Image (cartoon, helix red, strand yellow):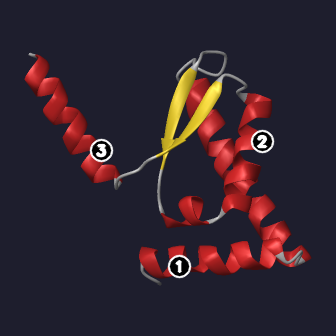
């Protein structure tokens, strides 16, 4: 098994190939976007949020380094969950969680 960061580094290769019009890369990105959109929409539906205005925070090397994949994911989610807004995390997920917990603790 490859480490997560090694796999994520391939995102720039995928992006480069998609931009150049490589049909196999475009197919792979489309498949990945379809699978990710299915996961997001299934979770939103399970929570009863598919018709609610909500934000879905995303992060990770693959999504943040592949404009093509991100665009495909966004388009597919908008079809099934039109009120969902994708937000790219500016920080690593753990940093976001710690900051949010810190801010919640200060309010109490």
Instruction: Give the secondary structure at mark 1.
Output: helix
Q: Left or right: 61 with respect to 78?
A: left
Identify the image quadrant of residue 17.
bottom right
Could you tell me how far apart the alpha carbons at marks 3 and 2 are, in whole angstroms?
25 Å
Give the quadrant of the C terminus.
top left
**Residue where numbered disc 1 is placed:** 9
Identity of the residue drawn at 50% across and 66% down: 61
Q: Residue at x 60, y 79 (%)?
A: 10
Q: Earlier in the sequence, mark 1 or mark 2?
A: 1
**Compared to 88, does 48 lie above or below?**
above
The picture places residue 32, in percent across and down from the top left corner, at 71, 60
The mark that comes first in sequence, 1 or 3, is: 1
Q: Which residue is mark 2?
A: 75
Disc 3 + disc 2, Cβ < 8 Å:
no
Comparing 48 with 19, the one in front is 19
Which of marks 2 and 3 precedes in the sequence? 2
Q: Residue tagged by mark 3?
A: 96
Quarter of the figure with residue 18: bottom right
Side (left or right) of 92 relative to 8: left
Q: Position of residue 41 (x, y in %)?
A: 65, 34
In this view, 56 is above or below 12: above
Q: Residue at x 42, y 80 (%)?
A: 3
Q: CA distance from mark 1 to mark 3?
A: 22 Å
Residues under labels 1 and 2: Cα distance? 24 Å
Q: Residues within 10 Å of mark 3 (few under 14, many from 20)?
A: few
Which element is circle 3 on? helix
């Amino acid at each position: 098994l490859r480490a997560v960061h090694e796999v994520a580094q391939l995102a720039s290769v995928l992006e480069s190939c998609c931009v150049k019009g490589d049909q196999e890369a475009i197919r792979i990105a489309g498949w990945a976007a379809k699978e990710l959109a299915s996961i997001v929409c299934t979770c939103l539906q399970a929570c009863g949020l598919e018709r609610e205005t909500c934000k879905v925070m995303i992060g990770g090397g693959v999504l943040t380094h592949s404009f093509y994949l991100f665009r495909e994911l966004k388009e597919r989610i908008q079809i099934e969950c039109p009120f969902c807004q994708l937000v790219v995390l500016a920080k690593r997920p753990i940093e976001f969680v710690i900051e949010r917990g810190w801010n919640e603790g200060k309010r109490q």
